[in-house]
Image: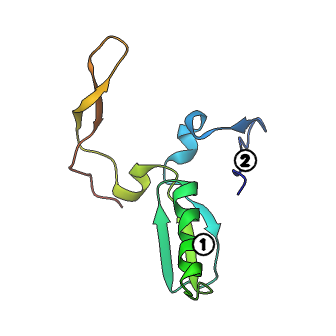
Amino acid sequence: MAKPRVVDPETNAILTGEESPRLQVGGLIEIAPVPMPQRLIMGEGIETVASVWPALKGVGRDLSRTAFWSSVDLGNMAGRAIATVPHPTLRMADDRAQRVAGPERASVS
């Protein structure tokens, strides 16, 4: 499966996920759009979500009413973190602990 191309609407430049933080806020990518879906499979990354389709199809699931979406960013699935916490093993270049989203999330509205 080829990776989709994300194009900046203002400059027409092709972006990677790392280059498009402003496009990630509140965003989603419909990997398998379905009108009036009865079921939604959603995950953080395109590849993660796309890997579910052949697994379900392989066991005989009818996916005609199942939509597959990528949230583009974990914050779009779980909400923005209220606070960050030090990661137990990841380190910054200056050897400080990398800070990551904590377990508490702000309400999504």
Disc 2: which residue: 5
- Left or right, 68 with reference to 107: right
Rendered image quadrant of residue 10: top right
Name the amino acid type tagged 2: Arg
Q: Work out which quarter of the rendered image holds the C terminus and state it.
A: bottom left
- Left or right, 56 with reference to 4: left
Disc 1: which residue: 54
Q: At 34% across and 59% down in the image, what residue appears?
A: 108
Rendered image quadrant of residue 30: bottom right
Q: Residues within 10 Å of mark 1 (few under 14, many from 20)?
A: few
Q: Nearer the viewer, residue 33 or 94?
A: 94
Q: Residues within 10 Å of mark 2 (few under 14, many from 20)?
A: few
Q: Looking at the picture, does residue 1 appear above or below residue 56?
A: above
Rendered image quadrant of residue 22: top right
Q: How is the image coloured?
A: rainbow
Q: At 49% across and 72% down in the image, what residue appears?
A: 41
Q: Work out which quarter of the rendered image holds the N terminus and state it.
A: bottom right
Q: Nearer the viewer, residue 71 or 41?
A: 41
